[in-house]
Image (spheres, grey):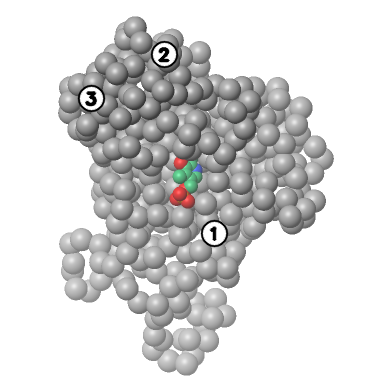
C-alpha cells in the first residue's frame, strides 16, 4: 500500500466487530471501561485506549492515520480548524522570549494570530520574503525557534524553496513548519523535502466540497504526538467525529481531484496568458513563472489556484466578476465548484494600499480556484468576464 490514491481510500480504517464496509461515525463524548482498574490504567496512561472525545475518538483517529500515511508522517493530530492547528503548534512548541521567522505571504489570519495574540505572550516575529533565502538567514536570532511558510503563496503563487529553508533552519536548530494547504500531499510532501511540521486547513482541498471546517498538524511522534497533542487534549480545539468523517470521504478522492483541478487550472492559465486584456498570469505551472523550475522540483503538479491581472484596475476587475455566471463569487477556495474573488477588496483588504501594491496585489488582480466543471464551460465564463473589461 504505497501509492497515494490507495492510501487515500484505505489507510487508517479499523473495522469493528459489525463488519461495516464504510467508516462509522463514533458520535460519543466519552467511553466506558470494563472495570475500575481499566479506568485507572487508561487515566494513568499505562494502557492505551479511549477516554473522552476531546482526547481521542475512533473516527478522528482514522482521519489522522489516513492523512499521516499520505503525508509520510509518523504522527498526525486533527484540530477544529486550520487556525487551531497553527495555534496549537505555537502554543505547544514556543514560549515567551522565542522568535519566529515567518513568510510575509501567509494567510491573513495567520498574521493576525501572531501580531495580535502571540506577541502578547512575549513571542517575537520577523516577516521576510518567501522567495529570498538570504533574508531568512539574516533574520535568524539566537532565540529563533520556528520558520513558518506557505508554498505556493496566496494569491500570487510565489514558491518557497523547502529544501533550502529546511537546511538553513536545521543549521540553526530551528524547526520548519509548512502550511501545505494549497498543494496537499497529492502534489507536495514537505516532510520528504526536509520540513519538520506540516499544517493543514482541512476546510479547503482535503474536504474539497466546502462542507466542514477543520485542520491538522503532522510530524514526528514527540513534537506532534506528545507536545501538540498535549495542548489539544488540554485546551480542546479538537475535531468533531462528524467533521472527521466528512474529511475521510474527501481524502478518498483527493488525488483524483487535485490532478483534475490542476490540469484544468494549467489549461486556463495558458489560455488567460494569451488574452490581450490580461496583463499577467500568476501560476507556477507556466514556463513564464520565474520559479517554474523550483516548483517542478518540489511539486508534482501546480494546484488549482490561478491569479491574473486585467487591464483597467478595480472597475474592470469588478465588472469581470459580475459578468461571470458559472463561477461562485466567494473568497473560499479548494472546492470542486470554481470560485472567483478580488483579493484587494476581500482576502487582502485589511492591509494598507501601499503594502498591497508592494506585494503585487493590485486593483486589477483576480484569483480563481478552479474546480471540476468542464474546462470549456469555465473558459466561456472567463471570456464573458473579459468581454466586460
Ligand atoms: C484557510 C486557510 C487557513 C485557515 O484555515 P481554517 O480552516 O479556515 O481555520 C490557513 N492557511 C491557509 C493557507 C488557508 O488557506
Q: Is residue 175 left or right of residue 292?
A: right
- Which residue lies most toward the front here? 315
Residue at left offset 45%, top offset 19%: 313
Which corner quadrant holds the C terminus? top left
- The residue lying toward the viewer, choosing from 61 and 15, is 61
Q: Nearer the viewer, mark 3 or mark 2?
A: 2
The answer to whether mark 3 is within 8 Å of ligand 1 is no
Residue with the mark numbered 1: 225
Residue 243 sits in which quadrant?
Answer: bottom left
How many angstroms separate mark 1 from mark 3 (CA)? 46 Å
Give x and y (percent) for residue 77. Answer: 48, 57
Residue at 53% across, 36% down: 349
N-terminal label among 1 and 3: 1
Residue 213: in sight, yes or no? yes
Q: Nearer the viewer, residue 17 or 227?
A: 227
Residue positioned most to the bottom? 36
Q: Do tag 1 and tag 2 residues touch (Cβ < 8 Å)?
A: no
Residue found at x 41% / y 80% = 30
Above or below, 124 relative to 42? above
Residue at the image point whose x is 72% and y is 33% from the top: 171
Q: Percent position (x, y) of residue 379?
A: 23, 21
Label placed on residue 311: 2
Q: Which mark is residue 381?
A: 3
Cα gap from disc 3 to disc 2, whole angstroms:
18 Å
Of the 4 image quadrants, the one containing the N terminus is top left
Amino acid at each position: 500500500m504505497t501509492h497515494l490514491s490507495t492510501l487515500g481510500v484505505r489507510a487508517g480504517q479499523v473495522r469493528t466487530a459489525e463488519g461495516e464496509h464504510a467508516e462509522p461515525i463514533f458520535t460519543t463524548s466519552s467511553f466506558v471501561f470494563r472495570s475500575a482498574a481499566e479506568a485507572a490504567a487508561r487515566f494513568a496512561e499505562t494502557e492505551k485506549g479511549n477516554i473522552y472525545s476531546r482526547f481521542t475518538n475512533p473516527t478522528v483517529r482514522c482521519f489522522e492515520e489516513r492523512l499521516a500515511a499520505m503525508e509520510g508522517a509518523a504522527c498526525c493530530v486533527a484540530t477544529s480548524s486550520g487556525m487551531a492547528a497553527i495555534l496549537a503548534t505555537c502554543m505547544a512548541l514556543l514560549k515567551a522570549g522565542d522568535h519566529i521567522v515567518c513568510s510575509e505571504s501567509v494567510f491573513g489570519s495567520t498574521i493576525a494570530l501572531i501580531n495580535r495574540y502571540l506577541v502578547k505572550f512575549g513571542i517575537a516575529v520577523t516577516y521576510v520574503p518567501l522567495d529570498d533565502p538570504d533574508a531568512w538567514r539574516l533574520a535568524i536570532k539566537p532565540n529563533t525557534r520556528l520558520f513558518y511558510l506557505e508554498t505556493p503563496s496566496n494569491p500570487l503563487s510565489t514558491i518557497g524553496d523547502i529544501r533550502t529553508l529546511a537546511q538553513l533552519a536545521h543549521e540553526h536548530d530551528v524547526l520548519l513548519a509548512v502550511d501545505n494547504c494549497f498543494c496537499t500531499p497529492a502534489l507536495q510532501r514537505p516532510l520528504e523535502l526536509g520540513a519538520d511540521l506540516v499544517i493543514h486547513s482541512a476546510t479547503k482541498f482535503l474536504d474539497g466540497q466546502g462542507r466542514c471546517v477543520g485542520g491538522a498538524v503532522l510530524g514526528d511522534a514527540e513534537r506532534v504526538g506528545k507536545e501538540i497533542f498535549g495542548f489539544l487534549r488540554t485546551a480542546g480545539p479538537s475535531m468533531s467525529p462528524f467533521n472527521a468523517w466528512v474529511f475521510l470521504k474527501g481524502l478518498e478522492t483527493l488525488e483524483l481531484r487535485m490532478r483534475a483541478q490542476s490540469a484544468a487550472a494549467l489549461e486556463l492559465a495558458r489560455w488567460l496568458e494569451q488574452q490581450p486584456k490580461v496583463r499577467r498570469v500568476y501560476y507556477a505551472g507556466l514556463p513564464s513563472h520565474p520559479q517554474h523550475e523550483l516548483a517542478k522540483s518540489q511539486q508534482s503538479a501546480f494546484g488549482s489556484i490561478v491569479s491574473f491581472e486585467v487591464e483597467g484596475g478595480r472597475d474592470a476587475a469588478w465588472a469581470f466578476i459580475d459578468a461571470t455566471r458559472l463561477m461562485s463569487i466567494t473568497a473560499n477556495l479548494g472546492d470542486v465548484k470554481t470560485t472567483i474573488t478580488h483579493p484587494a477588496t476581500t482576502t487582502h483588504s485589511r492591509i494598507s494600499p501601499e503594502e498591497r501594491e508592494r506585494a503585487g496585489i493590485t486593483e486589477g488582480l483576480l484569483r480563481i480556484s478552479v474546480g471540476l466543471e468542464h474546462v470549456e464551460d469555465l473558459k466561456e465564463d472567463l471570456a464573458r468576464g473579459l468581454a466586460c473589461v
